[in-house]
Image: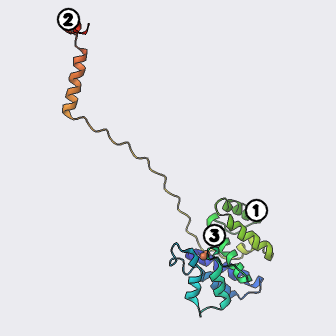
Amino acid sequence: MRSHSVIVSRLMRALAPMLGGNPTDWELVGLLHDLDHDLVGDDKARHGPMAAGMLAGRLPEASLRAIRVHDYRTGLRPTTILDRSLIFTDSLSRLIEDQGIRPPCTPSILLNAIREECTSKPWIGENVLVYAGREGIAIWDVVNGVELPNLTPQRPRPAPTRRAPAPRPHLKPATAKRRRRASVERRKPQTSRQLSSRR
Ligand SMILES: [Fe+2]
Ligand SMILES: [Fe+2]
């Protein structure tokens, strides 16, 4: 989560001069937007509003608003360029993290990454492409313009270990003896009396 917030803050700082924003304000919005992440638990409708409440009086109202509305599960809608830019960088950061994008990033690398990401998280591609088209942003230039922190690679899950079959319980000596006796009995030539009783 810390790497994610650092990436979002760097993307926000890189975007600000392109869109008439204050680089320091935008960077702080990126850095603090998930401040309540560990506090809201499963109640995602509170994710954003709670962080904005914690930061009230410490950031400009426009910054608080962007943090408040950045998660669609709040039901709040983005209206300003700062609101939309935070949603864009939040999604772009996820794309970078999930797909391991590293500079130099080209349009084709980016497009393939978006295609791959959209198989499980279609909203990421939509957030990134719609914003970039609307604001005329070359996404690969933004990615190449920021220093990305070292991300800890996702650890591959250990392959499930095959459990050795449980050893068959040894026969109890008494059982073994009984079976041996039965097999000897089967092999014994039958007496004429036994044979006659079968007839
Ligand atoms: Fe968030
Ligand atoms: Fe985030």
User: How far, Cα to Cα, is label 1 from label 2?
Assistant: 92 Å
Q: Residue 161 placed where, x, y %? A: 44, 50
The correct choice, above or below, for 95 with respect to 178 in the image is below
User: How far, Cα to Cα, is label 1 from label 3?
Assistant: 18 Å
The amino acid pointed to by label 3 is Arg
Answer left or right for 58 relative to 81.
left
**Residue shown at 48%/56% (left/top)?**
158
Depth check: 192 or 96 in front? 192
Task: Bin the neighbour count of mark 2 within 10 Å (Cα to Cα): few under 14, some 14-19, many 20 and up.
Answer: few
Residue labelled 2 has its Cβ within 8 Å of some atom of ligand 1:
no
Residue sitting farthest toward the bottom: 57
The amino acid pointed to by label 2 is Ser
Q: Residue 124 placed where, x, y %? A: 68, 67
**Residue beneath disc 2:** 192
The secondary element bearing badge 3 is classed as: helix
The amino acid pointed to by label 1 is Ser
Tell me if residue 84 can be seen.
yes
Residue labelled 3 has its Cβ within 8 Å of some atom of ligand 2:
yes
Q: Residue 141 placed where, x, y %? A: 75, 73
The correct choice, above or below, for 130 with respect to 18 in the image is above
The correct choice, above or below, for 46 with respect to 129 in the image is below
User: How far, Cα to Cα, is label 3 from label 2?
Assistant: 89 Å
* Circle 3 or circle 2, nearest the eye: 2
The secondary element bearing badge 2 is classed as: helix
**Residue beneath disc 1:** 108
**Residue shown at 63%/69% (left/top)?**
94
**Residue beneath disc 3:** 94
**Image quadrant for the N terminus?**
bottom right
Q: Are marks 1 and 3 in contact (CB under 8 Å)?
A: no
* Circle 1 or circle 2, nearest the eye: 2
